[in-house]
Image: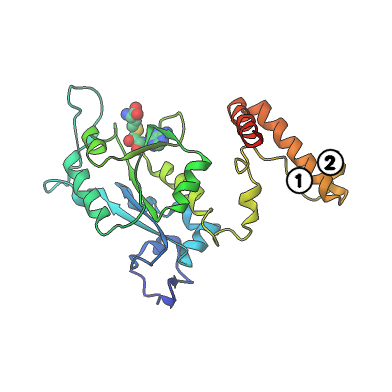
Amino acid sequence: MSDTPSKSHGRKAIRPSLKPRELMTPTPDLVGVWKAKILTLFPTAFPGVLGESLTGKALQEGLWQLETVDLRQFGLTKHRNVDDTPAGGGAGMVLRPDVLGNAIEHAMEGVQGNHPLIYLTPRGKPMDQAMMQNLARADGVTLLCGRFEGVDERVLEHYNIQEVSLGDFVMTGGELAAQALIDATVRLIPGVLGNQASTEEESFASGLLEHPQYTRPAEWKGRKIPDVLMSGHHGNVAKWRHQLAEEITQERRPDLWEAYLKSKETKSS
Ligand SMILES: C[S@@+](CC[C@H](N)C(=O)[O-])C[C@H]1O[C@@H](n2cnc3c(N)ncnc32)[C@H](O)[C@@H]1O
């Protein structure tokens, strides 16, 4: 526990001098503040990168909250076992339903409102911006991070847990996927980013990938910034950016391009 006093500013608890790990010291639930609860065997992996930069500052300012639940605390016997061999044989270990059930029920105690329970898994629905927008509008989220061969299927069925994937690859645990989900969600919460307009213009906001970005110097290694961006003509800049966003999306992501064309069609009919 840190000795740093918390100053209370209405619904916000401001803890100005705390280091990232100290941001995890238990704080009372702040009314109306988005909260992530993480069930993990590696609580010290948090806040990790979430404690840095804008997400870290926002955590410090009480714009969102983070709490870890250590799965090991719910382990069985004096060895605190959390896993067992897969039924039917095969390699690896599986996280036990009784251990996970106790941890989930502990984590969900007192949770109210729209607060989805999600298991991070390669079998899940791939993360996308629409999912993050929905989660940012929720009251918070509880994330179950798997390890080993994953979790007993009955837990997913019993608690009706949503399954979400970071992508089509297999990692050793769900912690990085949980941090990616939280980062992408928290930055959509009003006040977290300095410039809210940037979330309206960036990739996926309009169904397109973002146009290329440039900054000074005007010429670098013989490469110039496109003239239109230096023209000061806002209308032409906007037109150029939109055209480039369309070209890049069409070339790189035919799936997004098709969806974009369909949504344009629907809007105009
Ligand atoms: C080694 S993986 C288990 C993989 C599982 N046996 C399978 O084939 O689907 C261990 C844990 O890492 C997490 N994980 C791995 N890859 C992931 C991904 N692409 N997205 C989200 N979580 C992932 C999950 O929580 C999973 O339970």
Q: Crowding near pointer 1: few (<14 within 10 Å), some, many (20+)?
A: few
Relative to 81, 224 lies left or right = right
Residue 212, position as x, y percentages in the image: 72, 40
Q: Position of residue 203 (x, y in %)?
A: 62, 41
Residue name at image x 41 percent, y 64 percent:
32
Q: Is mark 2 within 8 Å of ligand 1?
A: no
Whether label 1 touches label 2, CB < 8 Å: yes
Task: Specify whether tag 1 is near ligand 1 (CB below 8 Å).
Answer: no
Q: Quadrant of the C terminus?
A: top right
What residue is rendered at 43% in x and 41% in y? 177
Q: Give the quarter of the image for residue 168.
A: top left
Query: What is the C-alpha distance between the residues marked 1 and 2?
Result: 9 Å
Amino acid at the residue labelled 2: Pro
Q: Residue furthest left?
A: 77
Which percent across, then down, holds residue 119?
34, 40
Q: Quadrant of residue 11?
A: bottom left
Q: Nearer the viewer, residue 50 or 91?
A: 50
- The disc placed on residue 226 is 2
Q: What crowding class fits label 2: few (fewer than 14 Cα within 10 Å), some (14-19), or many (20 or more)?
A: few
Residue 214 - label: 1
